[in-house]
Image (spheres, rainbow, N blue to C red):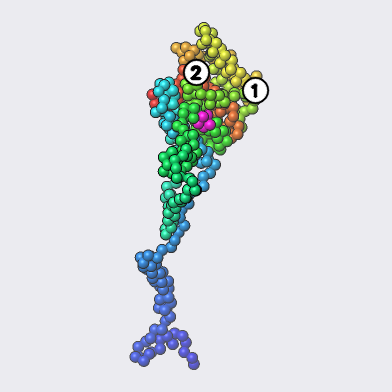
Amino acid sequence: MTPDATAARLAPGASGRVALRSPRPLVHGRRHRRPVLAALALVTTLLVAGCGVRLETPEPTEPSPDVHEVVRRAAVDDALAVEDLAAAVAPTVTDPTVLAALDEAGRFAEQHVQALGGVYESGLPVPTETDGESSPEPVEVTTSPAPGEGDDEGPDDPAGDGSQDAPVTGDGTADGTSTAAPTTDDVVTALVGAAQRTRASADLTQDAELARLLASVAASEHVSAQRLAAATGSEAATDLDVAVVPVEDTPSGVGAADLATLVAAEDAAGYALEVRGAQVDGDVRTAAVARAAEHRARAQAWALAAGTDGTDQDPRRTAYVLPDGEDVTTLARRLETELTASYASLVATAAPESRGDALALLTDSWLAALAWGAAPVAFPGMPEQQPAS
């Protein structure tokens, strides 16, 4: 009879004791081998690292800027160029009026740079020479003079010692590089270019708040260019006139409520200037009446574009309440400043590539506010950016 399993496990051994030959301790031992091996591997890795052996990882690279960042950097570069030019030209200016306009343009440009986020810095180290490599030593190349050259004094070498090795151009350099000092005309040219490029970027960018900021910066650059050109007699800003055409279409993305607010604001401005203009005489009256007609026409154009003209949704009224204590100049200045802010908000609300009218009217309203005596600011239409008084 063959003994069963239990009997075999309990069979007495040579010592007479019962030998328990269960396989469980062996299995249990195998289960603990993996943590032990992992610990050994970790220790080995640490020891190897301590000996100077390490895994190489690729060096971080400069991230590629997206469209938003490209637009922002371009505006910053333009503002920095204006700031640098203004600082370079200022020491040569003696006229107080020109110097004030130049200083204003430089200060505004500095504020634009800060509001736009400043110069981009990735924080990555500047690339240096590769280990083990060095820049080649400069090689000095000398040439022997041709027979009969350099022996005697001549018109090309008045000292007779070969010191005039390269021809000097009319601007005082040997390589033809211009060393002419910048002028106020250069500053006007830089401002004109900056205003045009920044306004175009404001129309194209997908970022609504960036579009509003760019629109404001462009209007400020436009004004700075015109003021400096007027002070210096420069003709570099002649092509910077704002072409305000009659509004025909509403900007994409603008809702009916926003359009109604704009129609009412333009119509109220026209009414106010008509009433106050009738109470004065001379050039002030002429200017007020002319500007009132422009505002009335814009209100009509916006109402037609919105499709509310003559309907129950037309927000225009027969008369508007005018505040007491404001003469025509103070009233006009306030109304134009408020319209500047309205058009800046419209830029942010409108979809890209449909902001042209809002951009032009923003600048036009700000120019009118200045004509009525408003103080120039770095960010027209953005009251939150103005310093506390």
- x and y percentages locating residue 25 in the rendered image: 40, 78
Q: Is residue 163 visible?
A: no
Mark 2 Cα-neighbour bin, 10 Å: few <14, some 14–19, many ≥20 = some
Magenta stretch, main secondary structure, is: helix
Question: At which x and y percent is residue 16?
Answer: 35, 90
- Mark 2 or 1: in front is 2
Circle 1 — which element? Answer: helix
Name the kind of residue labelled 1 in the image: Leu
Q: Earlier in the sequence, mark 2 or mark 1?
A: 1
Q: Position of residue 125 (x, y in %)?
A: 42, 50
**Numbered disc 2: secondary structure:** helix
Q: Is residue 100 left or right of residue 352?
A: left
Inspect this view and state whether residue 154 appears: yes
Q: Label 2 is placed on what type of residue?
A: Ala
Please tell me which residue is depicted at 54% across the width and 8% down the height of the picture: 278
Residue bounds of the magenta highlight: 189-195
Dot 1 alpha-carbon crowd within 10 angstroms: few under 14, some 14 to 19, many 20 or more: some
Name which residue lies at 44% across and 26% down. Answer: 102
Q: Is residue 306 left or right of residue 39?
A: right
Say which residue appears at 51% left-offset and 11% top-offset: 284
**Between marks 2 and 1, how big is the CA–CA gap?**
29 Å
**Residue bearing mark 1:** 304
Point out residue 176 in the picture as x, y percentages from the top left corner: 50, 38
Of the pair 26 and 34, the residue shown nearer to us: 34
Instruction: Name the residue rendered at 38%, 69% in the picture.
Output: 44
Residue linked to disc 2? 371
